[in-house]
Image (cartoon, grey):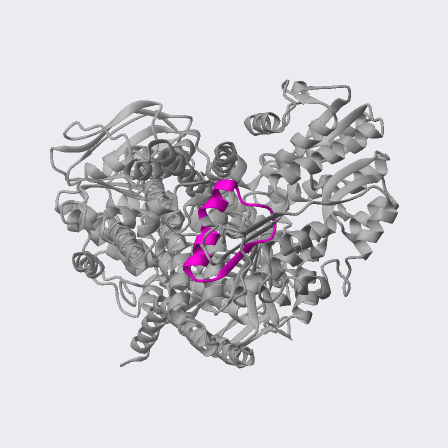
Amino acid sequence: MDKNDKLAVSYRRRQTLITVLPFLALAGLFGALCAIVTAKGYRLDMYLKIVFNEGVVLAIVATGAVFIYTLGSFDISLGASTLFSATLGVLTYNATESLPLMLLVIFAVAVGCSLFSSVLASVFHIPVFVTTVAMMSVLSAVAAQLITTYGGALGGISIPSEVVKPLDKPLFKIIVLVVFSALCIFVFNYTKIGRRQKFLGGNPVCAQLTGISLNKYAIIAFVMAGLGVGIGAFLTLVYTPSVTTTTAGSIGMNIIVAIVFGGMPISGGARSRIYAALVGGFSYILLNNILMLLVDSNAGYGISQIISAVFFLVVVFVTGINYRTQILPR
Amino acid sequence: MAKPILEMKGMCKRFGSTVALDKVDLTVYPGEIRGLIGENGSGKSTISSIAAGMQKADSGEMVFKGQRWNPASMVEALEQGFGMIVQEQGTVPGISIAENIFLGGISQFAHGPFIDRKKLMAAARQVLDRVGMDSVDPALPMGLLDMQDRKLVEIAKVIARAPDIFVVDETTTALSQIGREKIYELMREQKAADKSVLFISHDLDELLATCDTLTVLRDGKLGRSFTKDEFDPDLIRTSMIGRELQGDYYRSDTQATCRKEIALRAEHLTAGQAVQDVSLAVHKGEIVGVGGLSQCGMHDLGKILFGAIKPDAGSVTTGSGAAITSEAVAMKQGIGYVAKDRDVESLCLSASIQDNIAVAGMERYAVHDFLILGGRERKYVDQQIGELSIKCAGRDQQVSQLSGGNKQKVVFDKWIGRGSDVLILDCPTRGVDIGVKQAMYQLMVRLKGEGKSIVMISEEMPELIGMCDRLVVMKDGRVTKEFTRGPEMTDTEIIKYMI
Amino acid sequence: MKKSLSKLFALVLAVAMVASLGAMAYADDTVKIGVLVSDVSGEEALGFRAYYEDYIAANYDVTFTYTDQLEDAAAEKSAIEKFAAQGYDAILSLSSSDRVTQIETAIENELYYAVVSGMLEDEQFEQFKTSEYFVGQIGPSMDTEYEAGVAMGEYYAGQGVKNVAIYGAFIPNPMHVYRAAGLLAGLGCTYGGAAEKDAIVGQIFGDQGVDPSKIEGDIQVVAYLQGFGDTTFDELNGAISQGPDAFLSVGMATTFFADALNGAQIPYGDIDSFTSGNAANMSDGTLTYIAGKYSSSVGPIFAATLDAVNGNPIRDAEGNAISISQSYLVATDSETFDTIFNGDKGDSPIFSKDVLDAVIGEGIAYDDLVALVESN
């Protein structure tokens, strides 16, 4: 083997390492959580269920959002649209007592909000994230208005818990997660859509000159994200059958964290990975829980958030180093 | 002999799996214009960028003006008298031209917390005049300038600091003849002031005309150095590629040939001021050249033919009569487009070779024109990589890691692989070394033979003359003359219609 | 990079091991109570926390673990599940995104549950009152909230004010709606022609706020504002410029506006809590009326929860969970304020160990607890 071959092999090894790193991190965090929970004498089965419940909505919404992030854009309104579609879903159920209709409304609203953002952006030729910032304000304001109007004395609106309670089982959620992830993986990795979206994210000018229409693929991306939001909104209701003005409030930001933890650059492009959201979402939730278990809550509020923020910066830095050393000046 | 101004010894540098420099020594003396030549990836840009503080060497020693030299950044190097005009874009689009020129040194115009804009603009004015941009307002935002003017501002930025040595890295490829003359003049001024220049270029003719000495680099290693009296183009070429060029460089035939059928037709195209009433017909098996000064409108014409710019008037149709209204339609009709600005318009640098080649050819390997299967995709890409012998670590390698010539091969593969019948090539050999250039020319001849049509837009007259069946010359957006391949298609004749 | 990552994991694991050793030191018979909180920084919330953690935990064999700030219903539910996984005995809730889900989750996980601040809606209480794990609630009922509003209105009417500005806080938060309705009634005003509690409350819910044009009475409401946002201070300045005789708030004004109102020399009243900030507002500023909770007012619900955990549940005559209305204490001068405030400090809270011990243990009657709550 000559020197160049050796270098090529080491290059490949490093590429492989970069690919498996997020999985290693997930496995490591999972192991750490199990070790800590067991060592503390807590119930591991319950903890795993909790972590799964906390992570599943984030993972699903973020997986849908990968399509948008791949384009090098981002949607800050996803948390607000989750809230908005859940709100309209609850109001629909309370008006009709029909679960299928509620589901239909949730998905229609989620996809509709998403589409509206992207179409608005393409009509007015403004960056999509700008419209999503506006959408975030509008959707949360309207949702808050509806919740306070209809929730009145209760401060929130809800459907009777028995309606969706039977679905609040890990198996159901795992099935939903697997089916949606499989759909996203298929679209992203095995169709022209995903390839073209990655290319658009990497270099929109070049993509345009390769016959790829930004508007068309942005719309597809937003529809996929909308589906994720719809499922997320439904699973939120399955977990807690009520909606308050703060429901899903942290999802928008957590998506960014999840995607970064999953090893995908926020700038999207060629290194976008559909599993990033899944792996990163659960890694983030695991990390949070580990920190909460380790850091005495009486030590002061926000300590664990600060640590996870530092962790976030470290991940960005490490992935950044890797990216920088890969670039040859010419 | 005078003491050297710059001495580099045993310089080594690696990028991932690529060895860019392997123990290279280089010495430059005051009053010397030193040329550096080599194929893409030979290490000439790497060594000069290390000296200019743009990046660090893995090992090696440098001495500049008698002192150990290890600049932390380009700004620091420039402050110490080592300037570099970079190959890729080095200007900031959001701020004014004047601010770009004095970037990093703006404090010299400061009065307390405020900047004396008048003084800044006056100083910028002076420098702009020196690089021949006398009609440009230094207060304009940088983003308004085109590629050539941006390059000139970059030159101004370096000249403004009166450096002891400056590096001109492939700068001339972005410039028109007038711009090139200006830069040659600046180099001569530098020499006259007993200062030095490191001149990197692919254009052997301009190196021979300008340089005092010429050093060849090959595969990251130091090759032979030539003094002015030893200059011999053939010897230098052989030294560059390590072998003699096999076969013809340009086309060997001297007659225009093509088939009868028309492949692409443009009628009365007008787009703003750039293109005015241009009509053009390209036949199957024909190479049609479009030449002129950089601003003549030929680059816009290329984009219009590909549907990327919508003309105000006129139409582009295929031989079968289908109208080209967008890039997607053009591709559907078998048209491919290689853009001038390769890194921005033709490639996704952060993506792999595979992604770049595969993205345009999905119709060739997608099942039911929708489903992408890894095996089929990889086979398609490998075939294309083999077709043009791209030098790479594998199809997964990031395109940004490739040399200019290999990048261009990826672009060609992208379009040829999908079986384009008409190729619009805008400056297809820009920043590409001789070896790859020859391969490109041979490929064009082969494609012509297969009945494909080529529109070759170029600022290099020799290749237009060497390759085209017909040459359309443009000036100020209009076609001023059409030549047919033959003895009368000479540069002196052509230039008359360009200027 | 691989090295650094494995180092990181090693670090995480090492920290985990050390932490778990510490955790093992816990004795098993200590009663472990998880506290759900949505407000982690308010003076009132901090007062409750100090009372539980510093006083109660020192006097009883019990530990309190506070959650981080709970943003939504899902966070509340998962916090309860985590307490269950960690073997906690009871949940005290100061968070109210979704009470129903909280109680359901606590019951499912066999954790005793009590509402510490606010009261459930009647139908919600009905739903859970028979569950053995639902301890119940002690706090101001909606009627109490209404009465607190009435009392403040009557006080200022008695002072002879002619025009007032009103801050509706976070209407349609029910607590604030009831207080606002009471305030209007106390001032002797009608709202949309109505003078009865239910009618006024209904209209305010419907309007999602108080519409000054619907208020009629001898005392004029010259300005009304609610919520808190970018324009709130502009609205406040607008209200101040009307020169009201008093600024009457149904909550939070001492937190948001104390400085502005003190500065403008406008007398103001609020339904808030007995805190050091309010002591200063009353002695040095223009705060002239405060109705509020005090830190140890959360003592009786703790006692009831401890009883339940220890197998001595206090239930009403029908065997249902407790529901006791706790009224506010009122101060209109510094002296009274200080008496209440200083009487409820550090080592000598109003609900001290001596007082609470009367309702902790076997065979405590429901009426004993009611008497205890109403006595203070």
Q: In front: B142, or A293?
A: A293
Q: Quadrant of residue C237?
A: top right
Q: In front: B140, or A102?
A: A102
From the top left corner, tell me how far across and down residue B302 is, in percent: 32, 37
Relative to C288, B103 lies left or right: left
Residue B200 sits above or below residue B298 on the image:
below
Relative to C130, C198 lies left or right: right
Which residue is at 61% across, 60% downward?
A: C302
Q: Quadrant of residue C189?
A: top right
The quadrant of the rendering that contains the C terminus of chain A is bottom left
Relative to C355, C88 lies left or right: left
Residue B354 sits above or below residue C173 on the image:
below
Q: In front: A226, or B29?
A: A226
From the top left corner, tell me how far across and down residue B258 is, in percent: 14, 38
Which residue is at 39% across, 68% downward?
A: A26
From the top left corner, tell me how far across and down residue A205 is, in percent: 38, 43
Which residue is at 62% across, 61% downward?
A: C303
Residue C24 on the magenta span: no
Magenta segment: C101-127
Relative to A253, B355 lies left or right: left
Question: Can residue C284 be seen in the rendering of this structure?
Answer: yes
Question: Can residue B71 be seen in the rendering of this structure?
Answer: no
From the top left corner, tell me how far across and down residue C243 is, in percent: 82, 26
Residue C118 on the magenta span: yes
Residue B409 sits above or below residue A42 on the image:
above
The quadrant of the rendering that contains the N terminus of chain A is bottom left
